[in-house]
Image (cartoon, rainbow, N blue to C red):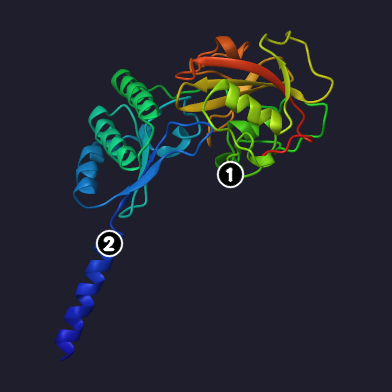
Amino acid sequence: MMHKVLFFVLVIVALCSALEERTLVVMHIFSSDKNPQWYLEGADRTNLLELVAPLYQNKENECYPNLHNLNLGYSGFSIVDSADKKCLHVHNSKEAEDFLLQIYIKNSIAENASSKKLTAIIDHASEVIRDGLRIERKNEMYANGFNLEPIRGPDNWNQSPWQYQNNCYNYGNDVRTDTFAQPGRGTQHKWEENTCTSVFDAAVRDGLLPYSDKLPEWEEKPKVGHFIALVIWPDVNFHWYKKDIDGYWSHKPGGTAARNVDNSDERIKDPSRADRGPYTIFCTYLVSVPSKVQIN
């Protein structure tokens, strides 16, 4: 009798262990939205671990500091397997990235994702996977935006946990909400389409002030608040920039670190001319007064 009980206990333990064997996958691609993530189990997990096994031998593939400094647009995947809990940044590894991209496509189709959005993501990610990803940074963000109103954001955006819980819209407004804030959500009417008009209108409802389609002069500053700029990745996502006290612009792609350089690692004098990766449409400039805007 005891042998039977022990046998069933061992079976249950084995089943529980098998159920816990899975790999968390995060695709690094969005700025204003949270990145897609999912778990792999069974054959998909086994195949992935075989593909990435050589990557664990190179410290350059460790998640940190890589994940602090990712570009706008597709910047690889990160994975954490239940067996060792190590975080691996999968980039510049075509076979593994293609494998994960195909799973993302399958998941997106199952969730009835917009065909235009999915096509744009596939085209962009495939191009980066083919050409390779550069993630080195010679500059990091060092100061808050130029505000004459009290600043509601943290003194240093690049600290845990708020770095990961706030996005480009939070940073652009200098308002920490820990919600990955969305234009219009704070005033109960969120943006509806990923277009300049829809996102702009939602931001104005939140209290941002329209300024101009023309770049503010180098030393120009609003009476209160600071300048902020909106750009769009057609059919996919949007992004914001903030003008700093030194006249240059800075930004914070999603949950990554705020920085004062563009995708080419150049200081940003004019967001409309900066290297923005797939965010090819420049929309307009606005003014944000952190103490007045209502964002969430």
Residue 169: percent from left, percent from top: 62, 32
Badge 1 element: loop
Which residue is at a point 81% across and 34% down the rendered structure image?
150
Which residue is at a point 39% across and 38% down the rendered structure image?
62
- Pointer 2 with pointer 1, Cβ within 8 A: no
Residue at the spot of label 1: 160
- In front: 29, or 296? 296
Which mark is on residue 46? none
Which quarter of the picture shows residue 8? bottom left
Mark 1 crowd level (few <14, some 14–19, many ≥20, 10 Å Cα): few
Mark 2 crowd level (few <14, some 14–19, many ≥20, 10 Å Cα): few
Report whether residue 296 is seen: no
Q: Inspect the image, locate mark 2, and give the three-letter code of the amino acid beneath it.
A: Leu
Report whether residue 110 is seen: yes
When the figure is inspected, residue 41 is found, relative to residue 263, above or below; the finding is below
Placement of the N terminus among the 4 image quadrants: bottom left
The mark lying in front, picked from 2 and 1, is 2
When the figure is inspected, residue 5 is found, relative to residue 211, above or below; the finding is below
Which quarter of the picture shows residue 66? top left
Label whose residue precedes the other's in the sequence (2 or 1): 2
Residue 131: percent from left, percent from top: 32, 18
Residue 170: percent from left, percent from top: 64, 35
Which mark is on residue 19? 2
- In front: 134, or 42? 42
Q: Is residue 244 left or right of residue 49?
A: right
Badge 2 element: helix
- In front: 50, or 221? 221
Which quarter of the picture shows residue 17? bottom left
